[in-house]
Image (cartoon, rainbow, N blue to C red):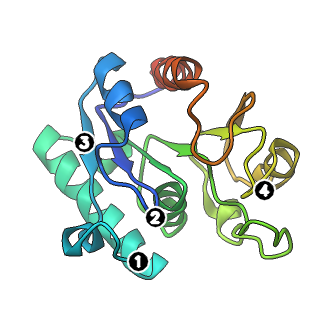
Amino acid sequence: MGPGPAGLLLAHGAGGNRDHRVFVAIETVLDLPVRRMDFAYRAKGPRQPPARVQALVEEVARAASEWADELGVGTEQIVLGGRSLGGRACSMAVAEGLPAAGLVLLSYPLHPPGKPDTLRIEHLAQVTVPTLALSGDRDPFGTPDELRHHLGALGGPWELIELPGDNHDPKKNDELLVASVADWIDRLS
């Protein structure tokens, strides 16, 4: 096995920003550098809708490359992660060929609420890096059982951590979430 991860890049969800409390908590406990990114549409104001997902995928790829350059490594030593839409964009970037050390998917938006047949999984088979998914057991964007079933399409090893009593924006299990991410990244080494 090669060297462990050199850094973590975190991308926010559709309505969030780089200062999401969980991102700050993760950065506080990790023993490696963390870059919390804002998507470009955030600069236009807090109520701006997100850009097309493909534009976000391209932003993730640029941010990962810049972060890796700053750290003096290749992107294959960067763990990519995000909440909801940010995690989806990261997973799509990896599926499209962006090398990464792993993926952290917090509240992956498997499908829109109430539309379980509108799945966002077509790219998952091309994701071959280790993946950690963390999701509330009351998330309307995908139940743990749905996630467990569809994450099976991933082309690499994966793990799912259920957050009891939480929905799409987990608030009850921050300690479990942060500790799980830290432990998983330690195990990547």
Q: Is residue 3 visible?
A: no
Q: Is residue 185 above or below residue 84?
A: above
The span from disc 1 to disc 3 (Cα, nearest Å) is 23 Å
Q: Residues within 10 Å of mark 4 (few under 14, many from 20)?
A: some
Residue at coordinates 51% horizontally, 62% vertically from top-left?
Answer: 85
**Contact, CB < 8 Å: mark 3 with mark 4?**
no
Rendered image: mark on residue 153: 4
- Residue corresponding to mark 2: 14
Q: Secondary structure at mark 3?
A: strand
Q: Residues within 10 Å of mark 2 (few under 14, many from 20)?
A: some
The span from disc 2 to disc 1 (Cα, nearest Å) is 7 Å
- Residue corresponding to mark 3: 35
Q: Is 93 positioned to the left or the right of 8 in the image?
A: right
Q: Amino acid at mark 3?
A: Arg
- Circle 2 or circle 3, nearest the eye: 2
Query: If you read the primary sequence from the N terminus, does the residue marked by circle 2 or circle 3 appear first?
Result: 2
Query: If you read the primary sequence from the N terminus, does the residue marked by circle 4 or circle 2 appear first?
Result: 2
Q: Position of residue 134 (x, y in %)?
A: 63, 37
- Circle 1 or circle 3, nearest the eye: 1
Q: Is 115 positioned to the left or the right of 182 in the image?
A: right
**83 vs 57, nearest the viewer:** 83
Q: Residues within 10 Å of mark 1 (few under 14, many from 20)?
A: few
Q: Position of residue 155 (x, y in %)?
A: 69, 53
**Contact, CB < 8 Å: mark 2 with mark 1?**
yes
- Circle 4 or circle 2, nearest the eye: 2
The span from disc 4 to disc 2 (Cα, nearest Å) is 24 Å
Q: Residues within 10 Å of mark 3 (few under 14, many from 20)?
A: some
